[in-house]
Image: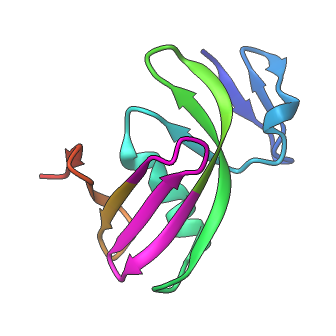
Amino acid sequence: MRLQRDDQDHWTVNGEPRDDLSGLKDIDIGVTPSTNVLPIRRMKLAVGESAAVTAVWICCPQLTVQPLKQSYERLEDNAYLYRSIASGYTARLEVDDNGMILAYEDQWACR
Protein backbone atom coordinates (compact mmCIF):
# COMPACT_ATOMS: atom_id res chain seq x y z
CA MET A 1 0.00 0.00 0.00
CA ARG A 2 1.16 3.50 -0.80
CA LEU A 3 -0.50 6.27 1.18
CA GLN A 4 0.39 9.91 0.50
CA ARG A 5 -0.77 13.30 1.77
CA ASP A 6 0.23 16.59 0.17
CA ASP A 7 0.73 19.94 1.90
CA GLN A 8 -2.94 20.81 1.30
CA ASP A 9 -4.14 17.62 3.06
CA HIS A 10 -5.23 15.82 -0.12
CA TRP A 11 -4.71 12.06 0.14
CA THR A 12 -4.02 9.33 -2.39
CA VAL A 13 -4.08 5.57 -1.81
CA ASN A 14 -2.00 3.59 -4.30
CA GLY A 15 -1.94 6.68 -6.53
CA GLU A 16 -5.74 7.11 -6.54
CA PRO A 17 -7.19 10.34 -5.07
CA ARG A 18 -9.38 9.85 -2.00
CA ASP A 19 -11.72 12.81 -1.67
CA ASP A 20 -13.30 11.27 1.45
CA LEU A 21 -9.97 11.82 3.23
CA SER A 22 -9.41 15.39 2.03
CA GLY A 23 -8.55 17.80 4.82
CA LEU A 24 -7.68 15.11 7.36
CA LYS A 25 -4.42 15.58 9.24
CA ASP A 26 -4.15 12.54 11.50
CA ILE A 27 -3.51 8.91 10.68
CA ASP A 28 -4.48 5.93 12.82
CA ILE A 29 -2.74 2.64 12.10
CA GLY A 30 -4.88 -0.01 13.76
CA VAL A 31 -2.05 -2.19 15.07
CA THR A 32 -0.12 0.47 16.99
CA PRO A 33 -0.98 3.04 19.64
CA SER A 34 1.90 5.24 18.47
CA THR A 35 -0.33 7.11 16.01
CA ASN A 36 -2.53 8.32 18.90
CA VAL A 37 0.40 10.58 19.80
CA LEU A 38 -0.30 12.79 16.76
CA PRO A 39 -3.72 14.18 17.77
CA ILE A 40 -2.81 14.21 21.47
CA ARG A 41 0.17 16.47 20.82
CA ARG A 42 -1.60 18.59 18.21
CA MET A 43 -4.73 19.28 20.28
CA LYS A 44 -2.94 20.16 23.55
CA LEU A 45 -6.07 19.57 25.63
CA ALA A 46 -6.28 20.76 29.22
CA VAL A 47 -7.47 18.33 31.89
CA GLY A 48 -11.24 17.99 31.54
CA GLU A 49 -11.32 19.09 27.88
CA SER A 50 -12.28 16.85 24.98
CA ALA A 51 -12.19 17.17 21.21
CA ALA A 52 -13.33 15.19 18.21
CA VAL A 53 -11.15 14.48 15.18
CA THR A 54 -11.46 12.40 12.06
CA ALA A 55 -8.40 10.32 11.26
CA VAL A 56 -7.31 8.35 8.22
CA TRP A 57 -7.68 4.83 9.61
CA ILE A 58 -5.66 1.95 8.26
CA CYS A 59 -7.41 -1.24 9.31
CA CYS A 60 -5.05 -4.19 9.66
CA PRO A 61 -4.49 -6.83 8.42
CA GLN A 62 -6.91 -5.99 5.58
CA LEU A 63 -5.08 -2.72 4.81
CA THR A 64 -8.31 -0.90 4.11
CA VAL A 65 -8.27 2.89 4.41
CA GLN A 66 -11.22 4.94 5.59
CA PRO A 67 -12.07 8.03 7.65
CA LEU A 68 -12.68 7.29 11.34
CA LYS A 69 -14.33 9.76 13.73
CA GLN A 70 -12.65 9.72 17.13
CA SER A 71 -12.60 11.74 20.30
CA TYR A 72 -10.01 12.31 23.00
CA GLU A 73 -10.77 13.46 26.53
CA ARG A 74 -7.96 14.46 28.84
CA LEU A 75 -8.70 12.78 32.16
CA GLU A 76 -5.52 13.69 34.04
CA ASP A 77 -2.13 15.22 33.21
CA ASN A 78 -0.97 11.83 31.93
CA ALA A 79 -4.20 10.09 30.89
CA TYR A 80 -6.72 10.34 28.05
CA LEU A 81 -9.90 8.55 27.12
CA TYR A 82 -9.90 7.56 23.45
CA ARG A 83 -13.26 6.86 21.77
CA SER A 84 -14.12 5.58 18.31
CA ILE A 85 -17.36 7.46 17.74
CA ALA A 86 -18.87 5.03 15.21
CA SER A 87 -18.28 1.83 17.19
CA GLY A 88 -18.34 3.23 20.73
CA TYR A 89 -15.02 1.51 21.49
CA THR A 90 -13.11 3.25 24.29
CA ALA A 91 -9.65 2.88 25.78
CA ARG A 92 -7.71 4.64 28.50
CA LEU A 93 -4.36 5.92 27.26
CA GLU A 94 -1.52 6.57 29.70
CA VAL A 95 1.08 9.02 28.35
CA ASP A 96 4.39 10.48 29.46
CA ASP A 97 5.09 14.22 29.77
CA ASN A 98 5.76 14.40 26.01
CA GLY A 99 2.47 12.73 25.05
CA MET A 100 4.10 9.41 24.13
CA ILE A 101 1.87 6.42 24.81
CA LEU A 102 3.00 4.34 27.80
CA ALA A 103 -0.07 2.12 28.08
CA TYR A 104 -3.14 1.47 25.95
CA GLU A 105 -5.81 0.05 28.26
CA ASP A 106 -4.86 -3.61 28.86
CA GLN A 107 -3.77 -4.21 25.25
CA TRP A 108 -0.34 -2.62 25.08
CA ALA A 109 2.33 -1.25 27.42
CA CYS A 110 5.78 0.25 27.01
CA ARG A 111 8.33 -1.63 29.09
Hey, which quadrant is residue 98 in on the image?
Answer: bottom left
Report whether 21 appears left or right of 84.
right
Could you say where residue 90 lies in the image, as x and y percent from the top left?
42, 53
When the figure is inspected, residue 13 is found, relative to residue 69, above or below; the finding is: above
Q: Please tell me whether the stretch drawn in magenta is mainly helix, strand or loop.
A: strand
Q: Quadrant of the N terminus?
A: top right
Could you say where residue 103 lies in the image, as x and y percent from the top left?
24, 56
Q: Residue at x 78, y 37 (%)?
A: 21
Report whether 24 appears left or right of 59.
right
Hey, which quadrant is residue 80 in on the image?
Answer: bottom left
In the depicted view, which residue is nearer to us: 39 or 79?
A: 79
Q: Residue at x 86, y 47 (%)?
A: 8
When the figure is inspected, residue 41 is found, relative to residue 5, above or below; the finding is: below
Q: Residue at x 42, y 65 (%)?
A: 81
User: Outermost residue toward the left?
Assistant: 111
Report whether 21 appears left or right of 29.
right
Report whether 94 appears left or right of 61.
left
Hey, which quadrant is residue 101 in on the image?
Answer: bottom left
Could you say where residue 30 lies in the image, as x and y percent from the top left?
45, 33
Could you say where residue 62 lies in the image, as x and y percent from the top left?
50, 13
Give the extent of the magenta segment.
Answer: 71-90
